[in-house]
Amino acid sequence: MRSWHTAWALSPVEKVFVYNNTSIVQDEILAHRLGLIPIRADPRLFEYRNQGDEEGTEIDTLQFQLKIKCSRNPQAAKESSDPNELYFNHKVYSKHMTWVPLGNQTDLFPDADFRPVHDDILIALLRPGQEIDVLMHCVKGIGKDHAKFSPVATASYRLLPDITLLQPIEDEAAETLQKCFSPGVIEIQNIKGKKVARVANARLDTFSREVFRHEGLKNLVRLARVRNHYIFSVESTGILPPDVLVTEAIKILMGKCQRFLNELDTVPME
Amino acid sequence: MAESGERKAALEMVQADGTDGNCVTFVLHDEDHTLGNSLRYMVMKNPDVEFCGYCITHPSESKINFRIQTRGSLPAVEPFRKGLNDLMGVCQHVLDTFEVRLLPEELRGLLGQEGLRTSVTKSLMGFSGILSLTLV
């Protein structure tokens, strides 16, 4: 799981060349915000940039342009105070970022549609007369360097819960028991006219341990975890689907092992 | 990452004088808990290993000290090599099982899988068990 956060590569905006920024968002703040926008570009299509290389070539850099100017709407009503009516382009969204192909990228990626993952990320607010004109370079990097390079939003794991009822629990106690756990965990069945509680789906439980606050119930339930059953939850930032992330992360770990196996074979043993 | 041009040693071995190769400290460059902890787990499964541990010498330096001490006269390189191979085996098994189970369910949004039990060692409590994915 650590591979997801530290070793996987992505290409968000790394360098911002500011030609004109008359908005009230300072250059560095604007650059910081642009860097955090996830860009829909498969990192496997690009190379890492060599260290010290400032310019960037077409195999390791994606170029985007953001050029927008706010102006007054002459048709707006005189008494209106709604900025949506009064001004054009006063909200700068990520959809205003356009891809500018470098070198032979138009031939390499004829069908590619490189753009931010989400179109409605608000970057800045403008008023008439203000404009933003920046050029952005996107570079491949890994999560260990900066969190913006991480392809996962959250990745976590937990063990499968194991809930055992030590004695049959009936009637009112069953109802209370059902309320102690997350919905769907405890099911109440009607057996011979009596309501009996049964563990339906322990996997849904979030382990709030509410049941231990009830004197009558706390000794009747055993909460445990199944020791060899892990549940991983992977949330992607949208660039790559989670199943791809999982397979690639496993391959990264295998790559690390292979590297040291090769080292063992090549370095003479003392 | 070790370049193929100028080769930086990614792995060094430090051995105290007087021992026979049973106790070796491997210095793994450009590594952290990702490999360290996983490898330690696999090496500890080996009954010939008396001691196995790793530490990150300093958080600013990206390297780990990985120490293995074996019982008897087994050279410490052997459990290290076996641990790496076993770890690769586990990863491969997880990958294969995952990809197989992924195929028919690709069309569905939410995906659940049965627990994976590896067959690499006799009693392996998989550190990679069930995977449940939430697509964003």
Image (cartoon, rainbow, N blue to C red):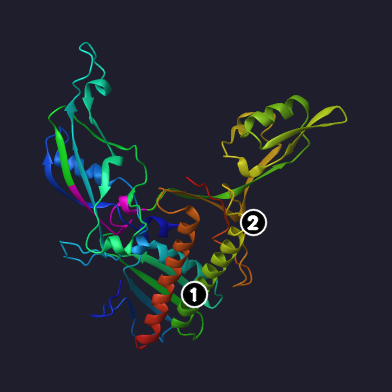
The residue carrying pointer 2 sits among few (fewer than 14), some (14 to 19) or many (20 or more) residues within 10 Å by Cα, namely few
Amino acid carrying label 1: it is Gly
Position of residue A117 relative to residue A54, above or below, is: above
The residue carrying pointer 1 sits among few (fewer than 14), some (14 to 19) or many (20 or more) residues within 10 Å by Cα, namely many
Q: Nearer the viewer, residue A58 or B18?
A: A58
Which chain's residue wears label 2? B
- Tell me the residue at 30%/63% (across/down): A107
Residue that mark 2 sits on:
B114
Res B102 visible: yes
Mark before the other along the chain sequence, 2 or 1: 1
Magenta run includes residue A144: yes
Residue A99 horizontal side relative to residue A161, left or right: left
Q: Does the CB distance between marks 2 and 1 fall below 8 Å?
A: no
Furthest-front residue in view?
A: A75
Q: CA distance from mark 2 to mark 1?
A: 26 Å
Q: Which mark is residue B83?
A: 1
Amino acid carrying label 2: it is Glu
Range shown magenta: A135-150
Magenta run includes residue A5: no
Furthest-right residue in view?
A: A192
Classify residue B22 by image quadrant. bottom left
Which chain's residue wears label 1? B
